């Protein structure tokens, strides 16, 4: 079968497999988005993982469609689309492609895995070429373009070139080398004596104390299994982030629902005397941040980019006090709530609206 990529707007023109996206008229949806119509047997933590499961089940209804699409370009979605177009090669490299998709979407990587460095090189190549030749993730609106339209140009460039780098990463060294070196330096810092990590599994919180902001691959790499990360940097600079693992339907384990962070921001503002205000993104954002706000609100592209590339302002609140406040907020918010799979957005929003007293009754 010779499958081919089509822009997302063409999904209704022929039977089409939709990857890492949702939309009416799909012959088959292979996405980990919350509530996506991915067949139950194919559900996976990543959309690329769902594609790889489908390739091992050729009898899957809709898999015979030749057109493939996605409504945005990111690493997980790209790997899924590419795998449908190159099924034999994809299945041959399935363990590596799964690592690439997980690192790209969740920023998590098991450094002890024998393919970890190859996965990092491929992700660095994709990131470097995307930024050099096109625009950064979530950067289309700033260029007055729609992502579902603009991203088709990225797919057109990457799809015929990825196989060579997959099979021979050294061929892309000129592109991935600088970013890979930066990530290795950051990972060494994250694994060194200056960084301490504390886990609070009951509320899914990982606390990372490290001298300065790190790239996400180094910061989140060792936090697999946790869904909220509190980063405590020298100089009383802090960020709290809900990871992407609770925006999607995670298949491998149950999770707690996201909490709206606005009440925690209000509590911290009552304690803050620096002259800056704490602000939080809403729970339906792909990766909500709680942080001290600057003079200008961060764009989505800035929030998605690495923490070491954005300003993080000093707080008047001591780090021990901040950690206690975050823990107390999560403990109150999750009182009476049990982890589960496949939360609906309605359920997620209801958890934040429901008074604590009614859960304890």
Image: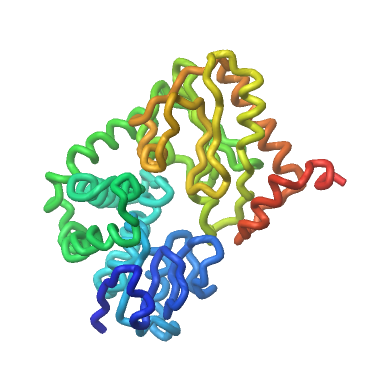
Q: Is residue 57 above or below residue 322?
A: below
Which quadrant, please, contains the N terminus? bottom left
Q: Nearer the viewer, residue 170 or 67?
A: 67
Q: Quick check: can you spot residue 117?
A: no
Q: Is residue 243 above or below residue 346?
A: above
> Residue shown at 14%/51% (left/top)?
172
Residue 85 percent coordinates (x, y): 26, 73
Q: Nearer the viewer, residue 172 or 269?
A: 269
Question: Is residue 142 toward the left or the right of residue 246 in the image?
Answer: left
Q: Quadrant of residue 253?
A: bottom right
Q: Is residue 244 above or below residue 292?
A: below
The count of marks equals 0
Residue 340 percent coordinates (x, y): 65, 57
Report the residue that reaches farthest toward the front: 144
> Residue shown at 73%/37% (left/top)?
332
Residue 121 percent coordinates (x, y): 24, 48
> Residue shown at 21%/64% (left/top)?
156
Q: Quick check: can you spot residue 212?
A: yes
Q: Is residue 237 above or below residue 117?
A: above
In this picture the colour scheme is rainbow
Residue 293 percent coordinates (x, y): 49, 27
> Residue shown at 64%/52% (left/top)?
348
């Amino acid at each position: 079968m010779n499958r081919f990529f089509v822009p997302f707007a063409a999904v209704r023109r022929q039977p089409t497999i939709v990857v890492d996206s949702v939309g009416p008229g799909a012959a088959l949806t292979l996405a980990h988005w919350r509530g996506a119509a991915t067949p139950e047997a194919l559900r996976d933590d990543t959309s690329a993982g769902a594609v790889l499961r489908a390739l091992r089940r050729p009898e899957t209804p809709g898999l015979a469609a030749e057109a493939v699409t996605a409504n945005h370009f990111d690493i997980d979605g790209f790997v899924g689309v590419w795998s449908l177009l190159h099924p034999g090669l994809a299945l041959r490299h399935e363990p590596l492609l799964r690592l690439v998709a997980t690192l790209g979407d969740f920023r998590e990587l098991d450094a002890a895995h024998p393919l970890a460095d190859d996965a990092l090189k491929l992700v660095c190549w994709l990131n470097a070429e995307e930024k050099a030749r096109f625009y950064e993730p979530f950067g289309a609106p700033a260029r007055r373009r729609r992502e579902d339209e603009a991203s088709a140009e990225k797919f057109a460039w990457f799809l015929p070139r990825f196989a060579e780098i997959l099979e021979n990463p050294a061929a892309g060294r000129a592109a991935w080398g600088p970013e890979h070196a930066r990530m290795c330096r950051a990972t060494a810092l994250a694994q060194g004596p200056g960084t301490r990590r504390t886990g609070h599994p009951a509320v899914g919180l990982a606390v990372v104390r490290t001298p300065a902001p790190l790239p996400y691959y180094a910061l989140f790499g060792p936090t697999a299994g946790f869904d909220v990360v509190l980063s405590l940097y020298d100089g009383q600079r802090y960020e709290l982030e809900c990871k992407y693992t609770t925006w999607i339907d995670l298949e491998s384990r149950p999770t707690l629902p996201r909490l709206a962070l606005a009440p925690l921001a209000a509590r911290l503002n009552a304690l803050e005397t620096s002259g800056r205000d704490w602000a939080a993104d809403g729970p339906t954002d792909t990766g909500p941040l709680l942080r001290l706000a600057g003079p200008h609100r961060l764009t989505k592209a800035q929030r998605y980019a690495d923490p070491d590339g954005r300003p993080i302002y000093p707080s008047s609140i001591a780090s021990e006090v901040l950690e206690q406040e975050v823990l107390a907020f999560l403990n109150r918010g999750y009182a009476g709530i049990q982890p589960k799979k496949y939360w609906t957005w309605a359920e997620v929003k209801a958890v934040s609206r429901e008074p604590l007293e009614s859960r304890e009754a």
